[in-house]
Amino acid sequence: MTNTILAIKNLSVSFDTFAGKVHAVRDVSISLYEGETLAIVGESGSGKTVTCRSVMRLLAKNASIDSGEILFEGEDLLKTEIRRLRTIRGNKISMIFQDPMTSLDPTMKIGHQIQEAITLHKPVGRNEAKAKVLGLLRTVGIENPEKRYDQYPHQFSGGQRQRIVIAIALACGPKVLLADEPTTALDVTMQAQIIDLFKDLQKKIKTSILFITHDLGVVANVADRVAVMYAGKIVEIGKSDEIFYDPRHPYTWGLLRSMPTLETDTPALHTIPGSPPDLIDLPAGDAFAQRNEYALEVDDWMEPPFFKVSDTHYAATWLLDPRAPKVTPPEAIEKRRQAYFERKGQNDEPA
């Protein structure tokens, strides 16, 4: 996975509000490789969805893209004319939204909705389009597709409706799939089924997926790489195993400690103290400093750069500076880390 299909470079997005200018995304740079699933995780309001919607330029009227580039196959989507962008949306880049009922027309049969997505971009006849729709319904796990083709959204469960939305997104065989919290509106059982569907689709069609979620547990088994976002910035990025078992940023520690596991033996889960900073009046230093029990004096006045942990793992925390005092991660994180490296048969910890 060395070929980059989507590159977001130095993206900054703000919103003009009555209270002031909200700096929702601040100098974000991430790359999505061909055939991989990259997850962006973080609390609500961290800038995940805004980053995702910027790719499609589906932002509110009061939003402004202050700087950056979004390169898809070498083309900067931020400079692309709207007419050209419409040929890319739904065709080469598709998006799945959080609530399937807001994406589906309640007055239109689901087969026709999927078929419309095909005929809008592809020169195919009605019979060929319908055959493709039936194949898509089977692919996403809808049983009896011939019968369900003529049914309306209200005749499906929440999980089935999300499968239909995924079928619409896949209708034209997109190269990039943007999934914005696709499991949040579903119960735990349905979440697991949709995640399994994403894993299966990844193997079958090799589409590159940008997966947005606030729940690290959701992407544990589906993401190849994970980017952790806080207060509009990426604070840590690495392979899935690196983020889950060898995290280096205190914010990532907090997210992992607040995630229930089978090994959790305490009556209450850990919570990150405080709340995210005001994105209108950001602090001078590290935005996470006020919530970080491991914060250093430098965090109050200087933002940390990215420090290299490995060729694929980077974290923006002053704790990784060679001059910083050695800090032992929380016990739960250290146990997870030790167990992981023991399973891998490594006696020495990574640098």
Image (spheres, rainbow, N blue to C red):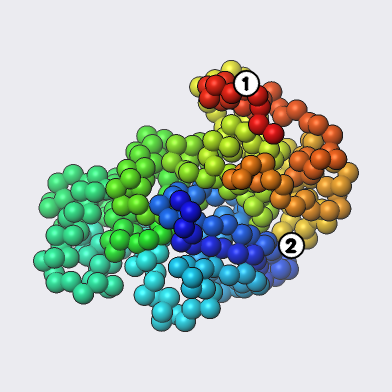
- Image-based side of 218 in relation to 42, left or right: left
- Image-based side of 5 in relation to 47, left or right: left
Q: Nearer the viewer, mark 1 or mark 2?
A: 1
The secondary structure type at the circle numbered 2 is: loop
* Between discs 1 and 2, the one toward the N terminus: 2
The residue drawn where x is 69% and y is 23% is 331
The residue drawn where x is 35% and y is 39% is 196
Is residue 191 visible in this depiction of the protein?
Answer: yes
Disc 1 and disc 2: Cα gap in Å? 47 Å
Question: Looking at the picture, how far across and down is residue 309, in whole percent?
Answer: 67, 41
The secondary structure type at the circle numbered 1 is: loop
Q: Residues within 10 Å of mark 2 (few under 14, many from 20)?
A: some
Kind of residue at badge 2 = Ile
Q: Residues within 10 Å of mark 1 (few under 14, many from 20)?
A: few
The residue drawn where x is 53% and y is 62% is 7
Question: Looking at the picture, how far across and down is residue 158, in whole percent?
Answer: 33, 46
Position above or below: 194 against 6: above
The residue drawn where x is 41% and y is 35% is 188
Position above or below: 10 against 190: below
Q: Quadrant of the C terminus?
A: top right
Kind of residue at badge 1 = Asn
State the residue in front, 275 or 316: 316
Residue occupied by mark 1: 347
Residue occupied by mark 2: 280
Question: Looking at the picture, how far across and down is residue 333, in whole percent?
Answer: 65, 28
Position above or below: 305 against 5: above
State the residue in front, 32 or 12: 32
Q: How many marks?
A: 2
Res 96 → quadrant: bottom left
- Image-based side of 302 in relation to 158, left or right: right
Of all residues, the one furthest to the top in this rendering is 265
Question: Looking at the picture, how far across and down is residue 169, in whole percent?
Answer: 34, 59
